[in-house]
Image (spheres, rainbow, N blue to C red):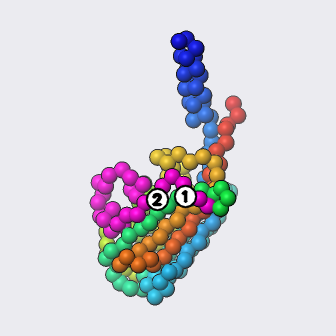
Amino acid sequence: MRMSYLILLFSGLSVISVACFSQNSTRYTNVKCIEMSPSYVTFKQCHLKVLGRGVIALTIQAVLLKDPITNAKVNLALFRKYNGFQPYLLKATFDFCKIVSKSNYRFSVEKIFIDAILPFSNINHSCPYKDEIYIKNIVFKEEFLKFIPLPSGEYQIQLFTFSDNILRAKVYVNFERIEELMKV
């Protein structure tokens, strides 16, 4: 009985020490934007930019050629690199117009994604969208992953966008996560 309490206490302390004495770093490594319907949408910008030592920003600017877009669906998936990229932890398809229009939307992967990109983009209103959609200089912050614990490794976010149930564009964002224990 006493031994089990000691084991429980030791394991609890080790979890706390790892949480308190670990330093995480996450950064973008690559981005690729593919136009599936060039007559519908084109990418004016799709690149990474180094802002400082170890600070990398992502910018994507899509020009909408068919105005206005009144319905949009997004397929969001996370992949981890093992022997090539394999599905990892999450995959969600959601009605983009619906989730952006509801500010009190339930806690979900979709809401975490929207909340992360909202301050850096012009998607701060619901449909219809016209002219262009952009995400400018978004730097990967640890806050993005506060509800999605990820171990060290290489990851890829796959974002497929649909309008009128037709695949319009694909965006692949690669990032690397490094967890290091701090020396005391």
**What residue did someone put label 1 on?**
87
Task: Give the magenta part as a residue range.
Answer: 85-111
* Type of amino acid at the residue the image marks with label 2: Lys
Q: Is residue 114 visible?
A: yes
Are there few (<14), some (14-19), or many (20+) residues within 10 Å of tag 1? Answer: some
Residue 59, position as x, y percentages in the image: 54, 69
Q: Is residue 135 above or below residue 181?
A: below
Res 104 → quadrant: bottom left
**Residue at 46% across / 59% down in the picture?**
91
Is 127 positioned to the left or the right of 182 in the image?
Answer: left
Identity of the residue furthest to the right in this view: 183
> Dot 2, how many residues are within 10 Å of its Cα: few (below 14), some (14-19), or many (20+)?
some
Mark identifier at residue 136: none
Indicate the position of residue 37 as horizontal and vertical percent values. Answer: 47, 83
- Residue beneath the point at 43% across and 60% down: 92
Q: Which residue is mark 2?
A: 91
Q: Quadrant of the C terminus?
A: top right
Q: Toward the viewer: 129 or 6?
A: 6
Report, in whole angstroms, how far the alpha carbon at label 2 lies from the one at label 1: 8 Å
Asked whether disc 2 touches disc 1, contact meaning CB atoms under 8 Å apart, the reply is yes
Residue 52 visible from this viewpoint: no
Callout 1 amino acid: Pro
* 69 drawn magenta: no
Reply above or below: 62 against 150.
below
Q: Residue at x 33, y 74 (%)?
A: 71
Give the percent coordinates (x, y) of residue 77: 49, 61
Q: Secondary structure at mark 2?
A: strand
User: What is the x, y in percent for residue 121?
Assistant: 44, 67
